[in-house]
Amino acid sequence: MARIVMKFGGTSVADVARIKNVAQRVKREVDAGHEVAVVVSAMAGVTNQLVGWVNETARLHDAREYDVVVASGEQVTSGLLALALQDIGVSARSWLGWQLPLHTDGVHGKARIKGIESDDVIRRFKDGQVAIMAGFQGLGPDARITTLGRGGSDTSAVALAAALRADRCDIFTDVDGVYTTDPRIVTKARKLDKITYEEMLELASQGAKVLQTRSVELAMNHRVRVQVLSSFVDSPGTLVVDEDEIVEKEVVSGIAYSRDEAKITLVRVPDRPGVAAGIFGPLADAAINVDMIVQNVSGDNQTTDLTFTVGKADLARAVQMLEQARSKLNFTELRPDSNVVKVSVIGVGMRSHAGVAQKMFSTLASKNINIQVISTSEIKVSVLIAEEYLELALRALHTAYGLDAA
Amino acid sequence: MARIVMKFGGTSVADVARIKNVAQRVKREVDAGHEVAVVVSAMAGVTNQLVGWVNETARLHDAREYDVVVASGEQVTSGLLALALQDIGVSARSWLGWQLPLHTDGVHGKARIKGIESDDVIRRFKDGQVAIMAGFQGLGPDARITTLGRGGSDTSAVALAAALRADRCDIFTDVDGVYTTDPRIVTKARKLDKITYEEMLELASQGAKVLQTRSVELAMNHRVRVQVLSSFVDSPGTLVVDEDEIVEKEVVSGIAYSRDEAKITLVRVPDRPGVAAGIFGPLADAAINVDMIVQNVSGDNQTTDLTFTVGKADLARAVQMLEQARSKLNFTELRPDSNVVKVSVIGVGMRSHAGVAQKMFSTLASKNINIQVISTSEIKVSVLIAEEYLELALRALHTAYGLDAA
């Protein structure tokens, strides 16, 4: 007997027929003798409609009232799934965020979970009752509904699994696991049986949309074994686990990419102390996140070229801010470029293997792909390349690192 | 300065544009210096969709989970209206049933209100804040969401007005008041300026859909001055008040009708003690409500004909039950008839005026309309007639009682 948390996203509960399918899936675990808690998202499309109404109603919205409106979506699904389970003879009840309660801080619209009171749920496990928790929502210190921000139901599920000391947290989604890279681009991409929290974290933050970054962090901190799997296909997914659980570590586990990058080059910036602060300070103040930064070695004329990346959505605003400060920063030219993509090679095995970055550079060079910016971390090497080379680069790297399916 | 509760039904908050109109209407009262609490229904169509999902999901549903699902509709409207008010500079916050809380008994799906904790709302009145309460919902003794049954938002509003000791409870709907009769049938129908609780109660239970019966009972018990008015037309509606407030009482205030009637005649039932109990006992056990009953004087052969009415929706079931008990009840024939309609003349003035019933009978006779069954109460005379005569009867009675508009 195990204790399991199962989380179903919006496409898995998109209509009543799918909710009934989910109930069957839950019943199977109950019949196998497991204690089961379920976390549900809003039915696909519902949250967008609710957010649309909020935006239509008020130009600037009170996040507390926004939360009242949008939290209703998960409320509906939790009630319907309880009914669907009861209808097939499984004892079940719904729990809203305020009922457990799931306590959060007071940052409405993107609250962080403080703790979950789960004694009642555990007590009812003994009577064979399935607990269905509305995802994405909690109770703030002001005794009002809070929501956790987009994708927050993943975080709800992992937090509940931690509170319940569950053996596993199964995240059911519309893909059947985590792949070595995007299978829509690389047909030889393989589904991974296991991946470490650290790798998953890099993948999530590098644009793989399988799990929300915060939920992976939370799983890592509380050592919650997470499984990503499909609610439509009946096969094991990918386990996200501690490094110790993976005996044969791959040097490289996956290759991620992000199209959400834009590059800015400032030509001939005076190379003196304080210049970087003068550039990046105002951007940080405006909540513009700067990712990769590269500064060329200074030439004879005491100037340097500075290149960095920002989110594509922030490019126009960043350019405007820099142009306004042109006289102060003293660069000769500003070159924005949104036709770039970031490709990242990720693997915990890098820690003990040399030459991983070198293989990336030589592979891209062999295909005549120019590397514009490089950044590295302990388990990741990222490069910025022209967007048109994305598919070519992904396929070449996938083969070079021995990731191709047999 | 007055303290006002305003209640807006589903058609008044059917979309964001109408919610913004409601906000303007509320703002006007706030600008006039009043303390305002608002009760809202779900956006038109939303409750039906939610109920549809529940029915699609489970054959027999757990009323506690039904409540979780359907209560979400009013939750959405309350949040949106708070946002719409804030957007035009009016301080406002939403209150869900569990937040005040509005306490109810534990009869999920049709709970009764036990009390409302309104101290917080009153405290915030002092700061100029409008309270927006989600209608139709409360908190049961099991700490779960309850709902009050269809039309329950009217009851929510009156209960809140009672708790707040409000000067008035304005019920905004899609009609502009209470009429002497259905203006779709009688073009000379007049809007009433005032009507007594007792008359409104009879009208509500006789098929006039303006206010839910329970809300009128509650208003009468707590002496809440209720006004029924249109959210689309800007004119005074009808005040539902205590008899003392009406100086010139009409003998007859209104003429109601109900198409929701079906007649059953049992021919030649043995006329002996216990027969009526043998017939109506099983119907009562099956929750079939019997309204009018008439028993003819017994003939020589010690039998009688018994006629009574049930709700149209219950007719088939009632007939089936009676046929099953035929050998025991010993009637010779069972005649069901669903082509009937009940017409009621209502007025507190009847108490002190003779001849009201006689005028009804003679008026109908003059139009050759046969009266099938009669029942009376202190302030009401009802007759059952063939459905085809409805319009003719309504117009003739309206004129006969001097109700026609000038």
Image (cartoon, coloured by chain):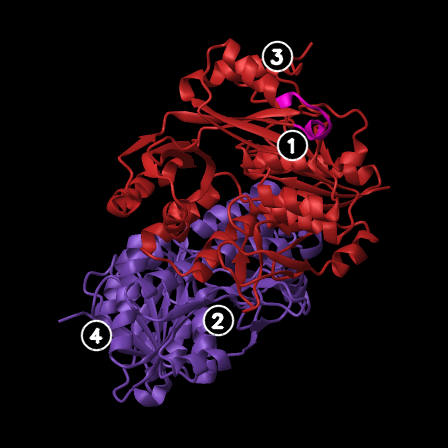
Chain colours: A red, B purple
> Image height check: is B40 above or below A331?
below
- Sooner in the amino-acid sequence: mark 1 or mark 3: 1
> Where residue A141 appears, x then y in whole percent?
57, 68
Residue on which disc 1 sits: A379
Q: CA distance from mark 1 to mark 2?
A: 67 Å
Where residue B267 appears, x then y in whole percent?
56, 55
Q: Which range is magenta?
A: A347-356
Q: Is residue A395 visible?
A: no
Figure disc tally: 4
Q: Is residue A309 visible?
A: yes
Query: Residue under circle 3?
Result: A399
**Quadrant (top left/top right/bottom left/bottom right) for the N terminus of chain B:** bottom left
Where does the image place residue B391, in percent across and percent down from the top left?
A: 28, 57
Q: Are marks 1 and 2 on the same chain?
A: no
Residue type at the position of mark 4: Gly
Which label number is shown at residue B214? 2
Q: Is residue B368 above or below residue A178?
A: below
Please give the chain letter of the residue carrying mark 2.
Answer: B
Q: CA distance from mark 2 to mark 3?
A: 73 Å
Please name the predominant secondary structure of the magenta segment in the image.
helix
Of B338 and A354, the residue lying toward us? A354
